[in-house]
Image: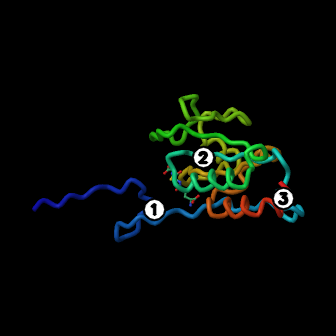
Amino acid sequence: MTEIRQKAEFTKETNLQGEFVRQQSIFRQGVTADGSSDFQAQSDRYHLYISLACPWAHRANIFRKLKKLENVISLSIVDPIRDNQGWRFTDNPGCIPDFPNGFKFLEEAYEMTDPSFNGRVTVPVLWDKEKKMIVNNESSDIIRMLDSSSKCNI
Ligand SMILES: N[C@@H](CCC(=O)N[C@@H](CS)C(=O)NCC(=O)O)C(=O)O
């Protein structure tokens, strides 16, 4: 029988056994009510970038709705088709362009936050419109922040 060997798509995230080992999310800061982090909780200060094609982004979107934060945290939805240029903003049906920054690609948000970032550009992303930087790109952190939003007065 012919053995089929395929080159892994994400070589930086493939271990010696050929298993996918997901990269760590590197932006892990938090929004706090008392301003103890650099990110004080404030209405209309934060923006959520999601893709409807991503289950991790979906949970952030679900929490934004469940916690009734639609008028408090603005939203962009990238085009669900991600080619080798990465997540992109379009005005195709179901997408919401990047009104805060006018980015064409989500990569620009990562670049603006850390020009040396060389990992995979992923959704969801929580963005600070005031400091113009990513607060957090880890969905489990983001949903915890949204869940505690009433404690944060946002
Ligand atoms: N640990 C991240 C994982 C997020 C993630 O992997 N998102 C995928 C979509 S489901 C992504 O954006 N992938 C972009 C890519 O592979 O280039 C989280 O839970 O927030």
Q: How is the image coloured?
A: rainbow
Quadrant (top left, top right, bottom left, bottom right) of the N terminus: bottom left
Residue nearest the observer in this picture, 95 or 5: 95
Q: Which residue is mark 3?
A: 38
Query: In the picture, residue 112 is in which quadrant?
Result: top right
- Is mark 2 in CB contact (under 8 Å) with mark 3? no
- Locate the C terminus and report the quarter of the image it occupies: bottom right
Amino acid of disc 1:
Glu
- Disc 1, SS: helix
Q: What's the amino acid at mark 2?
A: Ile
Of callouts 1 and 3, the N-terminal one: 1
Are the residues flagged by discs 1 and 3 in contact, CB closer than 8 Å?
Answer: no
- The three-letter amino acid code for the residue at tag 3 is Asp
Which residue position is annotated with label 2? 50
Q: Nearer the viewer, residue 28 or 69?
A: 69
| Label 3 environment density (alpha carbons within 10 Å; few <14, some 14–19, many ≥20) | few
Depth check, mark 2 against mark 3: the one in front is 2
